Image (spheres, rainbow, N blue to C red):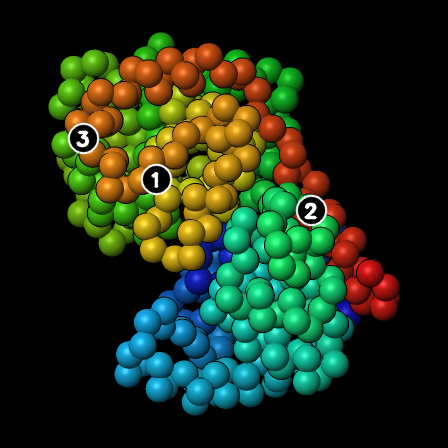
Amino acid sequence: MKIVLAGGGTAGHVEPALATAREWRKSHSDSQIIFLGTKGGLEEKLVPAAGFALSLITKVRIPRRFSLELLKVPNLLLKSFSECRQILQGSDLLVGFGGYVSGPAYLAAKTLGIPVVIHEANAKPGIANSLGALFTKNLAVAQPVDGGAFAGALITGLPLRSDVQEALLSAQGNWIGARKDAKNRLGFDEKLPLILVIGGSQGSVAINKTIAEVLPEFVNKKIQLLHAVGDRNVLPESGSLYKPTAYISDMATAYLGADLVIARSGAVTCSEVGALGRYALFIPLPIGNGEQELNARTLVDSGRAEIISQKSFSSAWLNANIDRLLAKSQSQSEKGSDSDLLAAVKITALMENAIGGTR
């Protein structure tokens, strides 16, 4: 069989697609698996590194406000649509995860009569997946969605990255020991609190600024920080208690070792915090369609996280609340959650049903 997966641009689209592809390959080793992507997207690095083929198409970015760029959209969409049709020829299934590459792919699959499966990671579906939902009933969601086509979708959870899944399975026998070991492997003192700060795949200037302002006070309090500043931002000077890095390659160990996670609330981050983290402070991205605030609601409702707006997230607020946040973390169970452990298995079952002509 020939399976095409569309999900690019951010980790929230690429990582679930990769996890699903790995799961599909376990039971369909002879399938040809092709990823659709765009130049400059995160998929350019992650997909080939995972051993899958990647075909690039023209990126179609639709401005949220009227501008001259909007006039270019029809021609770009037509070009991307034609490229998708060529790649999809002879395919048995298209699996979409949202993002720039998915919209044209859904349209191309519809004209070719190719069945489509869609997985929505966010609590509020994006434009591309909302478009794709017009062409298929084979819909899956990471968490319940209020209203619209995805309200009745199969709830699968969010497919975990391989390192997070392995860490979850390994820690289940001894969560306390796994967390102490992770902190040691990160090079931190297991007796001191450790905060993990991540601002998304490209980092966050706003979050980085606040952390820089509170750093002296945190050092005085013997609070350790592992800080992913993003590869587009200047790397600060490190110290015995503060370790900045452009990118954290071993996120599973970072989540396990952290007593508190300060992060954006992208779908993947929320899923991974739920699987391995203790407690989280989420600062939703202030742009977009509001999905980041909704993504965190399950963790907030279960007492595993809280949300603060970027406007309110200041050095004064963080200094005043850090002791409370760390105490809240210490009151949580050492255990993570396996609620997303079978997400990729459920999506692949939906894929098999779609190919077989049933829902």
Amino acid marked by disc 3: Ser
Q: Is residue 332 left or right of residue 97?
A: left
Q: Which residue is mark 3?
A: 315
Callout 2 secondary element: strand
Q: Which residue is mark 2?
A: 155
Give coordinates of residue 75: x percent, y percent: 43, 89
Q: For marks 2 and 1, give the CA distance.
A: 25 Å
Residue positioned 58% across, 66% down in the render: 130
- For the residue pair 191 and 197, the one nearer the viewer reads as 197
Looking at the rendered image, the quarter that the N terminus falls into is bottom right
Q: Quadrant of residue 322?
A: top left
Give coordinates of residue 69: x percent, y percent: 31, 81
Q: Which residue is mark 1?
A: 283
- For the residue pair 129 and 96, the one nearer the viewer reads as 129
Residue 148 versus residue 227 in the image, above or below: below
Q: Earlier in the sequence, mark 2 or mark 1?
A: 2
Q: Is residue 277 left or right of residue 195?
A: right
Q: Earlier in the sequence, mark 1 or mark 3?
A: 1
Give coordinates of residue 8: x percent, y percent: 49, 63
Q: For marks 1 and 3, give the CA distance.
A: 14 Å
Characterize the local packing of mark 1: few (<14), some (14-19) or many (20 or more) Cα atoms within 10 angstroms.
Answer: many
Callout 1 secondary element: loop
Characterize the local packing of mark 2: few (<14), some (14-19) or many (20 or more) Cα atoms within 10 angstroms.
Answer: many
Amino acid marked by disc 2: Ile
